[in-house]
């Protein structure tokens, strides 16, 4: 077997894919810096590793182009590898988070009433005075910056309830199904727990509340534009509050209505006239959503009021 120069198409394919990876990484950081560094670090790690790998391929391509003789099976492997590499770039693009906007960013500041603490895996709001023994664990929607829910949930903390917004690996709630366990361990003094979530986060919150991922379950289930994936009408013992919008293009009114059969008969439904899917957080418009006919401030106020009334009732 003799060595030969790599064919130009192969060299330029490697270089093109490497440049693509680097471009995707630069684009992601440039357009969603805040959402990336304030979300779970898993996505940032993937971006950095991808950029390092791409640079290594570029350096190798520019400094060493000799290969052993080619065989048909190796060509198949290389073509398959190129397709997978392009798919990886597409995955990195898809995983880019929706970054939080105002007033959520202002709601992240601590003051005399609430202390806000952010770690790599959570955002926690703790009341400074007259704290209750009730905690709220909240699962963000898919790919949404966890800070986006700060303004919606801060009124709960101001009323005395501890609020923990979990940061999901890669922004996917199904990768963080034991978040309620972690919140309980971190706040052992709290005796009553509600678990809530927005969109996909609400699906996982339903599992946690029902004891599917946490043997203890929860005392309350708070759904923001969401519904359970399976029938838990007879197994779920937690109190349920479902808050939805009439102009939601993702968790549509029809889907919310159908979810009644999967929840206990005692579940309470609050429907906000004119609210869209993305108004359950502060992160800007979302593809596939409907067009809201009320202001973000009005929707946020109604969502927070309904959520607070529900959490208050658990105590």
Image (cartoon, helix red, strand yellow):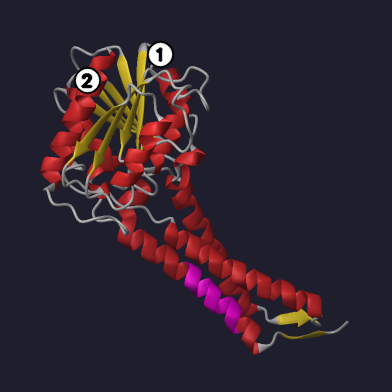
| Span shown in magenta | 12-21
Query: How would you classify the magenta stretch by its main secondary structure?
Result: helix
Residues under numbered marks 1 and 2 in contact, where contact means CB atoms less than 8 Å apart: no
Q: Quadrant of the C terminus?
A: top left
Considering every residue shown, the one lying at the far right of the view is 1
Query: Relative to 216, does residue 72 appear above or below in the rendering?
Result: below
Q: In front: 41, or 299?
A: 299
Res. 299 image quadrant: top left
- The answer to which of marks 1 and 2 sits earlier in the sequence is 2
Tell me where residue 266 appears, x and y as whole percent.
33, 21
Q: Residues within 10 Å of mark 1 (few under 14, many from 20)?
A: few
The residue tagged 2 is 127
Using residue 231 as the reference point, say whether residue 70 is left or right of it: right
Q: Which mark is residue 188?
A: 1
Res. 128 image quadrant: top left
Residue drawn at x 60%, y 77% is: 14
Residue drawn at x 46%, y 20% is: 217
Using residue 288 as the reference point, say whether residue 21 is left or right of it: right
Tell me where residue 116 appears, x and y as whole percent.
25, 30
**Which type of secondary structure does the marked residue at label 2 adopt?**
strand
Q: Is residue 151 within the magenta segment?
A: no
Res. 155 image quadrant: top left
């Amino acid at each position: 077997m003799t060595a030969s120069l790599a064919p130009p198409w192969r060299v330029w394919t490697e270089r093109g894919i490497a440049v693509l990876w680097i471009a995707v990484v630069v684009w992601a950081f440039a357009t969603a810096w805040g959402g990336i560094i304030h979300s779970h670090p898993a996505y940032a790690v993937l971006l950095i590793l991808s950029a390092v790998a791409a640079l290594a391929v570029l350096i190798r391509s520019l400094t060493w182009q000799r290969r052993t003789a080619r065989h048909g099976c190796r060509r198949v492997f290389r073509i398959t590898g190129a397709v997978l590499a392009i798919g990886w770039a597409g995955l990195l693009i898809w995983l880019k988070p929706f970054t939080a906007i105002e007033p959520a960013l202002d709601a992240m500041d601590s003051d005399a009433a609430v202390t806000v603490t952010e770690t790599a895996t959570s955002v926690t709001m703790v009341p400074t005075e007259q704290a209750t023994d009730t905690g709220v664990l909240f699962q963000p929607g898919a790919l949404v910056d966890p800070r986006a829910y700060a303004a919606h949930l801060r009124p709960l903390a101001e009323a005395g309830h501890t609020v923990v917004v979990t940061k999901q690996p890669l922004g996917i709630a199904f990768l963080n199904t034991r978040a309620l366990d972690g919140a309980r361990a971190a706040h052992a003094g709290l005796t009553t727990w509600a678990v809530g979530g927005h969109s996909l986060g609400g699906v996982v919150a339903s599992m946690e509340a029902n004891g599917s991922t946490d043997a203890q379950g929860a005392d309350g289930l708070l759904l923001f534009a969401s519904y359970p994936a399976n029938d838990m009408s007879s197994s779920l013992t937690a109190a349920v509050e479902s808050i939805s919008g009439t102009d939601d293009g993702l968790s549509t009114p029809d889907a919310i209505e159908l979810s009644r059969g999967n929840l206990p008969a005692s579940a309470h439904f609050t429907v906000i006239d004119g609210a869209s899917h993305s108004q359950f957080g502060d992160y800007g418009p979302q593809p596939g959503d409907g067009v809201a006919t009320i202001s973000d401030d009005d929707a946020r106020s109604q969502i927070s009021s309904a959520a607070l009334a529900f959490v208050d009732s658990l105590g």
